[in-house]
Image (cartoon, rainbow, N blue to C red):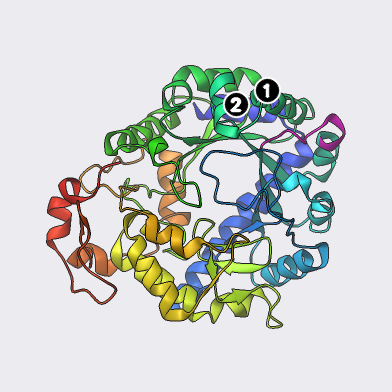
Amino acid sequence: MLPQLAYRILRTTDLRALWKFSWNFGVRGMLSVERFKRRLKKGEYFPPFIYVSIINSCNLRCQGCWVDVAAPRNSIDLESMNRLITDAKANGNVFFGILGGEPFMHPELLDILESHPDCYFQVFTNGQFITDKIAARLRRLGNVTPLISIEGREMVSDERRGKKDVLNKTLRGLDNALKHKVLTGVATSVCQSNIDDLLSESWLNELIKRGVHYVWFHTYRPVGPEMNTQLGLSQEQLVAVRRFIVNMRAKMPIGIIDAYYDDKGQALCPMSNGVSHHVSPKGDIEPCPIIQFSKDSIHDSRGIYKTIRDSEFLADFRKLSAESTRGCVVLERPDLVKDLVQKHGAKDTTVRGTALQELEAMKPRFSQWLPGEEIPEKHWMYRIAKRFWFNDFNAYQGLDAAGPRHQTTQGGPESKLDAPSSPAHNAGRKQVVTKS
């Protein structure tokens, strides 16, 4: 698998862009994680990876989207982004995820990327704005990989994305990027309507034949103003997604990303272990993209490093989440998220202003943490990479030793923020949590 993947990438990627990926993301990215680990030993937190939603606007209207895509435009300007990236670089960071809305609707996106040739950017996009001209510029920049979302075949894509002819328009953008030898990935939010079509070896073979270099399967999370719980996966499907990824990594010549498991197959949350936080289109620093509350901003005169390092809100959020679950705290315990938001007086960072009511409307459900269902990595490369540079970084020591602090039942949460430990939670968890 690995020799085939290496040969395919070498043959289909611009060599200058491949060098920038190898150096900026690979070597310097690993050094950034090592610096992060040294900070942890001193009790300091600053994530090695920062995800920034630079704009809220989007040309699509996806089912279950939590972003205010139809609201008046909010975006982070070039000066603010340059200040954020420069400060983060000074403290060892070189990798940034760029989200939206649709990032390519930001008029200064390419200028942002061009201003920092010593960094690496992953742009999460629906691909429809990647014209031949844009793709040619991405190749010249060399420090960016577009991650293009595909949510199903023709009919499913139109239903999931809220527009017509979505798949064909997205594939045109994908093909433009690949034609110009840009390192390119495809992302899928796996849900009930696409799991059978896209979580398959035949789909991976199609992407390989097309020239796609890597894929990212992440599971749909029902949150936001129009959360579509019917699209959520069952416990069995969540395990099936993990098993598929592990098996295909050891078999198929295509990179496969996941962000929610370590080398042993134990669940983790990149927010809980301190690996990443999120910046909203208004500059608010949030725990993660789906938790839209904040006490801090990139516009703080201290800079993003000191702002995140000194944030009591973010520190409490990491602690609460890691003491409650190895999975997603907002899915499993929305009541705890609400309590913490109210405790800190954190502001709702949405335009719609209904994030707290949305938390109140959520019912606990499974996330990626399913004790007893761990599936370790099979391929040596992924095992080594995760063991050293993507694991829980000891965030869950108390949880692993004593079990979760809180219990979730069929009728709803039994305990609040100050509830005692519940070691029995692990033994009965698969029976007591509200099933998807």
Q: Could you tell me which residue is drawn at 77 percent across and 36 percent down?
A: 129
Secondary structure, magenta segment, majority class: loop
- Residue 130 lies in the magenta-colored region: yes
Q: Secondary structure at mark 2?
A: helix
Which amino acid type is shown beneath numbered disc 2? Answer: Asp
* Image vertical order of residue 317 relative to residue 43, above or below: above
* Image vertical order of residue 412 relative to residue 366, above or below: below
Q: Secondary structure at mark 1?
A: loop
Give the CA distance from mark 2 to mark 1. Answer: 6 Å
Q: Could you say where residue 247 lies in the image, as x and y percent from the top left?
A: 38, 29
Query: What segment is highlighted magenta in the picture?
Result: 126-134
Residues 261 and 264: in front is 261
Picture mark count: 2
Q: Please tell me how crowded label 2 is: few (under 14), some (14-19), or many (20+) other residues with Cα within 10 Å.
A: some
Task: Tell me the tag on residue 158.
Answer: 2
Circles 2, 1 touching at the beta carbon (< 8 Å): yes
First along the sequence among labels 2 and 1: 2
In the picture, which quadrant includes the C terminus? Answer: top left
Q: Could you say where residue 364 lies in the image, as x and y percent from the top left?
A: 30, 53
Residue 85 located left or right of residue 188 = right
Which amino acid type is shown beneath numbered disc 1? Answer: Asp
Task: Tell me the tag on residue 95.
Answer: none
Residues 76 and 373: in front is 76
Residue 436 located left or right of residue 181 = left
Residue most extreme to the right? 133
Which residue is disc 1 drawn over?
165
Residues 386 and 300: in front is 300
- Residue 38 lies in the magenta-colored region: no
Toward which corner of the image does residue 416 lie, by quadrant? Answer: bottom left
**In this view of the protein, can residue 142 be seen by the observer?**
yes
**In this view of the protein, can residue 42 be seen by the observer?**
no
* Image vertical order of residue 272 relative to residue 121, above or below: below
